[in-house]
Amino acid sequence: MGAEQIRRWESGALAHAVSDPFGQGPLPWLRGSENYFDDTGQMVPWYADETLARGGGGGPRTADDVHGQIKGFVSTGAVAPGEAIDFHITVDPPQQFSVDVYRIGHYGGDGASKITTSPRLSGIVQPAPLTADRTVSCHHWWQSWRLQIPSYWSIGAYVAVLTTVDGYRSHIPFTVRDSHPADLLLVLPDVTWQAYNLYPEDGRTGASLYHAWDEEGRLLGEEEAAVTVSFDRPYAGAGLPLHVGHAYDFIRWAERYGYDLAYAETRDLHAGRVDPSRYRGLVFPGHDEYWSVPMRRTVELARDQGTSLVFLSANTMYWQVELAASPSGAPDRLLTCRKRRGPGRAALWREIDRPEQQLLGIQYAGRVPEPHPLVVRNAGHWLWEATGAGEGDEIPGLVAGEADRYFPRTALPEHESRILLAHSPYRDGEGARRHQETSLYRAPSGAWVFASGTFAWSPALDRPGHVDARIQRATANLLDRICKRD
């Protein structure tokens, strides 16, 4: 589809689609076919019947950023049971709306469970977003609803589903966390989610760390994108982050098999709210590209003190970022990444002589335009035990989106043992032959550090159409060893 055919509010979705072949993934409580674009090029959400998305009536329709039928965000990061979370919501035209709150999990295959429903709330049209140097913020929106988290609620990943009386729907993700010990701490990549957020996708004012628009509604690239983005705004489109499905895939699978999970967000790592000694392992389930200095320091200290690390995606810890308070003083509400622009330090970790490989064991190599098989190596290793995978076997479609590999000229982390468990050839966007690798090493502390090296690992755990029993068993082998279940 040529750029001249793309309506302004669709261009951002199209631009980002190449970086995640799985999109956001089907919402677990409304699983359906993964149709992203209809025959006119209009983006269609994965959960909506196409006739409804075109305005056919009879059911919920997705709000968009041009008309802003209903959009919202929460004004804090992860919250604990007993605390309150404030919702800031705009409704156009003004009318009543309700909020259904779901918790992501297995729930007998449903994928989520409805936890509560708000009373009918009065919606207003909030002021237009404020913009300054391409930073878009809605910190001045009035509070629409305060949800007091009951002490008996389970910690986990939640989604608030906003629905207007006339049937438009949007979403707000949030996390409920606590500090109790657990086998595994699941770290949701909210910093990376916000880096990709192009709200509002209106062809005029929206901006992410990747894109912005000019005066004629043309989509601009990284050189003209925002340097700073705000957490005080909705997520673009249907209201969920671009890569959120990867985390939900892992959650559904892990809760199905009874793993003892705690939950946090990457801003909790940044702010020092995570004590890694309470956990046997930290799990990073999805695309986790943007890391601050305190985030990396916390995770390296965790490894060095014996807490294992599991990275289930690729292109992890690529850009170095800074977090700052909002204009109202709320901490960690502004995310800055200069991407080699302007004064200050270089933005790539590998450009300041701290390459990702020194933590992960491998590092980002490039995009994978079309899915390729993951080729098993060292099949006798315990990770592949009872998977049925043999040496050189190909697991279809498991190298996708983006890929990591071992860089021989880059220093490795200190280790007692190290092994590469996949070596998979693929073609890049220019047709050049490249390869992906999956890494596992054991630190001197005894901690295991696993890096899948591909976007497609988490979707293989519980994504309809992508499940692979070999990857499920290999992941269980890894987590069981970390949790001492072996």
Image: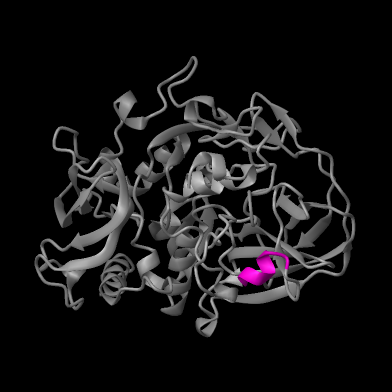
Task: Determine whether, in the image, residue 252 is placed left or right of residue 304.
Answer: right
- Indicate the colouring scheme: one colour
Above or below residue 368? Residue 221 is above
Q: Residue 349's spot in the image, x, y percent?
A: 36, 31
Residue 146 colored in magenta in the image: no
Residue that sits furthest to the top in the current view: 343
- The answer to whether any part of residue 314 appears in the image is yes
Q: Residue furthest bottom?
A: 108
Q: Quadrant of the C terminus?
A: bottom left
**Picture residue at 25% right of the left edge, 58% below the top:** 372
The quarter of the picture where residue 329 lies is top right
Q: From the viewer's perspective, tell me whether residue 231 is left or right of residue 424.
A: right
Marker count (numbered): 0
Left or right of residue 430: residue 114: right
Residue 306 visible, this angle: no
Find residue 413 and report its horizontal and vertical position in percent.
22, 41
The image shows residue 66 at horizontal and vertical percentages of 72, 46
Q: Nearer the viewer, residue 26 or 329?
A: 26
| Frontmost residue, 70 versus 72 | 70
Q: x and y percent of residue 245 in the render?
A: 49, 61
Residue 423 higher or lower than 219, as above or below? below
Q: In which quarter of the image is residue 62?
A: bottom right
- Up-down relation of residue 338 to residue 284 (above or below): above
Residue stretch rendered in magenta on the structure: 49-55
Q: Residue at x 63, y 49 (%)?
A: 236
Find out whether residue 52 is within the magenta segment. Answer: yes
Is residue 119 depicted above or below 299 in this figure? below
